[in-house]
Image (cartoon, rainbow, N blue to C red):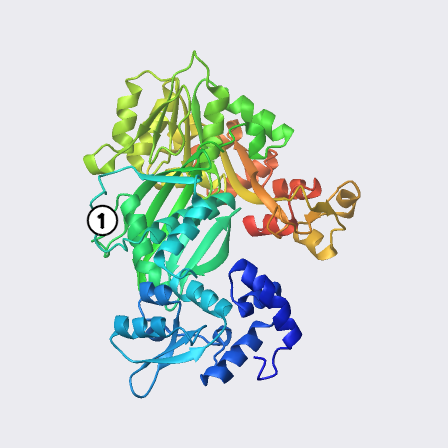
Amino acid sequence: MLETGLLASELVDEGRAEAEANGEGVLDTLVKKGAVDPSIVTMAKSTYFGVESVNLTELRLSDDVIGLIPRHVAKKFNVVPVGQSDSGAVVVALSDPSDIDSVDGLRHALSRDVEMRVTSLADIENALNRYYGGAARDDGAIAKMIQDMTEGEVEVTGLTGDVSNDTEGVDADAPIIKLVNQVIVDAFKKRASDLHLEPLGKRFRLRFRIDGICVEQPDLPKRLQAPIIARLKIQSGMSIAEKRIPQDGRINTNVGGKTIDLRVNSIPTQHGESICMRILDKSGLRLGLAELGFFADDQATFERLIGLPDGILLVTGPTGSGKTTTLYSCLNYINRPDRKIITVEDPVEYMLAGINQVQVNEHIGFTFANALRSMLRQAPNVIMLGEIRDLETASIAINASLTGHLVFSTLHTNDAPGAVTRLIDIGVKPFLVASSARCFMAQRLVRKVCKNCGAPYELPAKEAQALNITREQLEQATPRKGRGCSECNKTGCRGRFGIFEIFLVQDEVRRLIFEKVPSNVLRRKALELGMRTLREDGTRKVLAGLTTVDEVVRATVSEH
């Protein structure tokens, strides 16, 4: 480099003494110190050795090109394939053209001729990480790198079957195991409720659902798609030989001393099996009614309802709206030594102390209906049914509520009055619904304004109009919005809580149910009797500075 004029002799002399003391090369020392631009070193090597240079950051290498060199070979010799010459030789990028032994070893490993291109060491490491899943020189170094990230943080154990000898189709490389574990750790640390691994045409996409919103993470290496999926299927007790049908599994995991459950589902897609994992943090479940998001007036109403000796209370909403957490909170509130509480769930998501929880098993014929019949012989005071799915289950639940039991359950409907129509549609007699029902409650989850970066702001007229907020309401309100910080991952929101629509079944409502009136008539009557809609409850919480207009609009349907 001195001969080419790319480096001053004074700079070389300055770096030589330090390099000798550290046992490193002069150029490496100067690059680490930032005294020399890596591109200048690459240019000098290209000129000195008569080898063309290449900038890997500007190249998009296809899978066909990456496939020219196996992963373990590329990492062993610290090279990246960039193409194939007309003569059939593999064109590789490396950082040190003078390392003849490595070049000869590469030729021997590939059984093909090799043509060299020179690039910086940093570019080599970044490209190895991008295309092969790690930037180390060999597999042993990769294992150490990933182990350093997860050491003492994660211990993953499959719950079903002996998988110790089930290694078919799995990359036996330890780094795969560490990489999968690290993905789970990252998802947990970012408070994700779901983890999605999605094979696309040329990508292996990774997304975390954080506070109800899917957030893209850096893609996993496409070439590691098969071993990663196989690893997860083995851990969750699925068959790795079956790739044509959906499968379900479960992983029990310890992360940072906390126990979490991963409910794993695989489904075949055009480009491979898509994996979804629901993350259930057993230690992080907050079961207080106040934590659900109730204002004081709604909480008092709900506490009175769940303290009744009999009847049925239904929580409605789409998947992921927090219905199960609400039911658990209800049970936790009324759980006393003088009450026997039994739940029927599929699956049992969280273990509750002092409560008998039953897991249904459709494969052996132990259905919701069979479990309900059996549990009634246990003389419970309170019954929680995970979901009403059919007429048989609904009939048993309603009959139980009419014979002195308090019954909690869920339905998938858009609003609270719609639950009445849903029950009648599946075959329940209107007089049974009218006689047994105490309350129907619809709910949605909205994101909270971040406590760390949230600050008061003036609600724009357009946002106020979206929720029909009046000027008088704004004068007495304190709307807040997050600016975005490290605590909320620059989103301005952290955590979620509920907005609610509580439909009390009063005498006038019972008469309408018995007459089998349409859902819109029930809704009008409920509003006349004081029911607050989901959007109205959300508006209250916007004015209190707890959430934003965008969140309420996203989670609710306009009443107009």
Horizontal and vertical percent for residue 300?
Answer: 60, 25
Horizontal and vertical percent for residue 397?
Answer: 35, 28
| 353 is higher (above) or lower (below) than 527 | above
- Closest to the observer, 178 or 555: 178
* Residue at point 48%, 42% (across, down): 321
Tell me, yes or no, if residue 68 can be seen here: no
Horizontal and vertical percent for residue 69?
Answer: 32, 71
| 108 is higher (above) or lower (below) than 445 | below
Q: With 328 as the anchor, is 224 left or right in this view?
A: left
| 304 is higher (above) or lower (below) than 46 | above
* Residue at point 46%, 55% (across, down): 207
- Closest to the observer, 36 or 533: 36
Tell me, yes or no, if residue 451 can be seen here: yes
**What residue is pinned by disc 1?**
239
Label 1 is placed on what type of residue?
A: Ser
Q: Quadrant of the N terminus?
A: bottom right
Q: Residues within 10 Å of mark 1 (few under 14, many from 20)?
A: some
| 380 is higher (above) or lower (below) than 412 | above
Q: How many marks can you see?
A: 1
* Residue at point 47%, 65% (across, down): 126
Q: With 467 as the anchor, is 166 left or right in this view?
A: left
